[in-house]
Amino acid sequence: MSQHDEIPFVAELRRELVDAIAAQQRRAAAAPDGGVAVPGPGRARGSRWPRRRLLLTGAAVVVAAAAVVVAGLVPRLAGRDSTAAAAALNQAAKVATTRPSQRLQPGQYWYSKTRETQLVTIETYRVRWTITYERWVAPDGSGRERRHVDEQIFPSEADRQAWIAAGGPDPDVYGMNTDDRKGPGGYDLVELGSHRPSYDELLALPTDPIALAGVLRRAAEQTPDTPGSTTHLSVEQKMLGNAISLLRGSVTPAAVRAAAYRVAASLPGLRQLGAVTSATGRSGVAVAISDRYTILELVFDPGTSELLSERQTLVRPDADLHLPRGGVIHEAVFIASGVVGSTSATVTP
């Protein structure tokens, strides 16, 4: 990549790269036990994060990470991971480095099947939909998405009566049962908050946990809460959500998945919830991070590094949502994923 090809964000920060690397090396040398340090909650003074899609190839990866270091946003969190949650996540990171990466070739698609439970507001009532998503995504972002509502439940009798008063509309009325196809750029393999990296950008993500933490934090800081939402996510929760996106299946390079697990292990406030059984019957470990509004948790298998599910629940009862403490706002169970040769082929769980 020539200097003329770089986006302005990269060109601005390139001149600071040498000093940034030197500063980070000094911090790393001073850190006890060689532990991982991740960016803290501050924002770089005078820095900018482009609202366009992230360009994370070549020098952009290095400079984007260095931008965080330049502003001094990399305080130590812990010299050594001492919690059970961090230990389990770091174990998954070690396993992830040994797992094969499934690189997409032209003519191939990344297939994924997910079952999600979502609480949504429609006009005068709220409804909880359980939706099965199947996606086929090619390296250029073209592909297919099939979506079907398997179940709908009303959180209160008042919501059910409001639904009846509205004519008892089927989910089809709101376009929920679909089978769509799109051309290049139509679908995303991963989501980093409001940013949608291309496949080439995904392959170029940094494998160093410090650099990847910088990318995930910047994406989190630039991702607003959903307009009108009564719940909110902290920056750390959004960072964990971004890590989860990278951990869904092995389309993400193995070294990047390992770094994502290590970033998650270093997030402040993370705790282990213990051994659980996922909705698909698989055994895993649950870890979570919370703020005063919600708890975001993920379930993974430390022995295989596979992500099994994620869930967002309430810290306290919410009268607007008609949900008690611990009520589920959103849940996703990852059923199957893998490389296939057409938009009709699937992967057996």
Image: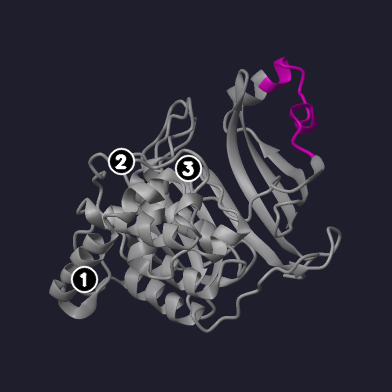
Label 1: which residue?
25
Q: Is residue 250 left or right of residue 293?
A: right
Q: How far from the left and from the top, in percent, is residue 177? A: 79, 39
Q: CA distance from mark 1 to mark 3?
A: 45 Å
- Does 18 appear above or below 227? below
**Mark 3 residue type:** Gly
Q: Residue 347 appears in which quarter of the rendering?
A: bottom right
Q: Which residues are magenta?
A: 163-177
- Does 234 appear above or below 341? above
Q: Give the SS element for disc 3.
A: loop
Label 2: which residue?
292
**Mark 1 residue type:** Gln
Q: How far from the left and from the top, in percent, is residue 267? A: 31, 59
Label 3: which residue?
327
Q: Nearer the viewer, mark 1 or mark 3?
A: 1
Q: How far from the left and from the top, in percent, is residue 1? A: 51, 60
Q: Is residue 279 left or right of residue 142?
A: left
Which of 112/152 is in front?
A: 112
Quarter the C terminus occupies:
bottom right
